[in-house]
Structures are given as C-alpha cells and as structure tokens.
Image (tube, rainbow, N blue to C red):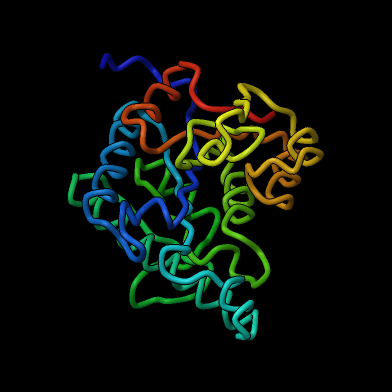
Amino acid sequence: MSKKASQFKRILLKLSGEALMGEGDYGIDPNVISRVASEIKDVVALGVEVGVVIGGGNIFRGAGLAEGGMDRVAGDHMGMLATVMNSLAMQDALEKQDVPARVMSALSIHQVCEDYIRRKAIRHLEKGRVVMFAAGTGNPFFTTDSAASLRAIEIGADIVIKATKVDGVYSDDPMKNADAVRYDRLGYDEVLAKKLMVMDATAIVLCRDSDMPICVFSINNHGDLQRMMQGESVGTVVE
C-alpha cells in the first residue's frame, strides 16, 4: 500500500478487552495482540500520533462482578487493573515491532508504568511514541469508553476510533438479525435517541459537547485502520 499522507495528525484508538481474546474465552491471544500492534505500526509509519485505550473485559469487568454481589467500587478498581495488564501487553507487542510505546495509568503503579499527566502524554505523542492510557479515568462508575472520550479531548486528538467486531454501527445486532441496517454517518443525538450501541451515553455526550468525531470500524478487517487514515470511507462516522 502506498504511503499516502494521513488526514489525521493525532488519534485515540479505543480497543475492547474482548478484542484481544481472539477465539478464546479469557485473557490475551498473543497472535491477536501482535496483529493489532502491526496495524498500529502501519499508522505510526504515516506520521500519525496514536493514543490507545484498552478495556479490561477479557480479564475482569467491574459491573459484572457487582451483579454477582461484589462491591461495585472494588469491582471497578479490579477492572481498572485489568486495563493496566492489557496496556502492558500492548506495550510489549509494539516494542517487539520496534514501535516506541509508553503506558500511563490513572492509578499510580510506579513499578510498572508512568502516572497519567496530560502534558507529559502529549510530549510522548509528539516524540512519536504510542501512549496507552490505562486504568480508565481512575474513578469507579466510569467505563473505558468514557475514558477514551475524555483522553481524546484532553490530548487534542482529531478523532476517537472505536474498534469492534463488526464493520460499523447497525440498527440491530447484525450477528443476530440479518435485516439489521448499517449506517454510514450518524449524529450524536441520533445515536442517543436510538440507543445505538456505539459507546455509552456519557462518552457520546463528552464527544458531542467537544465536537469530537467518532468512527466505529472492524479491527478484524486488516488494513482498514490505515485506509481510514488515508481518507477512505471505512466504518460508521458519528459527528
């Protein structure tokens, strides 16, 4: 693929923890995380500054633990630690492909990663390092979707890119309903009114109020992230 210039200078890529499981039921598939790291490397090669937020659902999900009787705050803190584990794994996968990377956590864990400091994060990005923003917002009751929107706004990203298992936003679950309609473009308020499962409502409102566009695409379509950077129509855009 030709190295056409990117239409974006800085992006925030949101990955679900489940995306790292591959065909497994739990944990991280080394082949999957290596492939995702390769996709990020291709984008970095275009000169794009990349921030990443990874969920923790492949290890722990705070809300699910709370439903099972655990204190919600404790469960959410466990979920935040799961995102740190995923971020460290992604850092390792990127460095194995000679892509400089840093993990910055909203919870202080000095032995394994840096604290999240906005100005320092922006400096890392300017130096061409991929930055993993771990531990969500550092607060319980907020999802990693909300953390992705917040970090994107804080670092001045051009767009939030949410990687999913399907190639955009549909009117219904396309895995269960063959008649589900795929949208090319949506408005923030339309997403909220139709309760479309793009991101949670808090994340959508954050993006809406800061005019931060969102693109939802499939991480399973090799090269789509790079094609998106180069201006091709990929996934569903919310703006």
In the image shown, does 72 or 152 lie closer to the viewer? 72
| 52 to the left or right of 145 | left
The residue nearer to you, when weighing 74 against 180, is 180
- Image quadrant for the N terminus? top left
Q: Position of residue 83 (x, y in %)?
A: 45, 65
Residue at (52%, 69%) from the top-left corner? 61
How many numbered circles are shown? 0
**Residue at 34 percent of width and 77 percent of height:** 111
Residue at coordinates 57% horizontally, 58% vertically from top-left?
144
Q: Quadrant of residue 50?
A: top left
Please state which of residues 161 and 209 is positioned toward the viewer in this rendering: 161
Q: Does residue 219 appear to the left or right of 191 in the view shown? A: left
Q: Which residue does the image show at 53% across and 53% down from the upper left?
A: 119
Q: Quadrant of residue 181?
A: top right
Q: Position of residue 223 (x, y in %)?
A: 33, 27
Q: In the image, is residue 159 above or below residue 142?
A: above
Apparent side of residue 189 relative to residue 177 in the rendered image (left or right): right
Q: Quick one: quadrant of the C terminus?
A: top right
Q: Quadrant of residue 197?
A: top right
Q: Position of residue 200 (x, y in %)?
A: 68, 51
Whether residue 29 sits left or right of residue 50 in the image: it is: left
Q: Is residue 231 above or below residue 220?
A: above
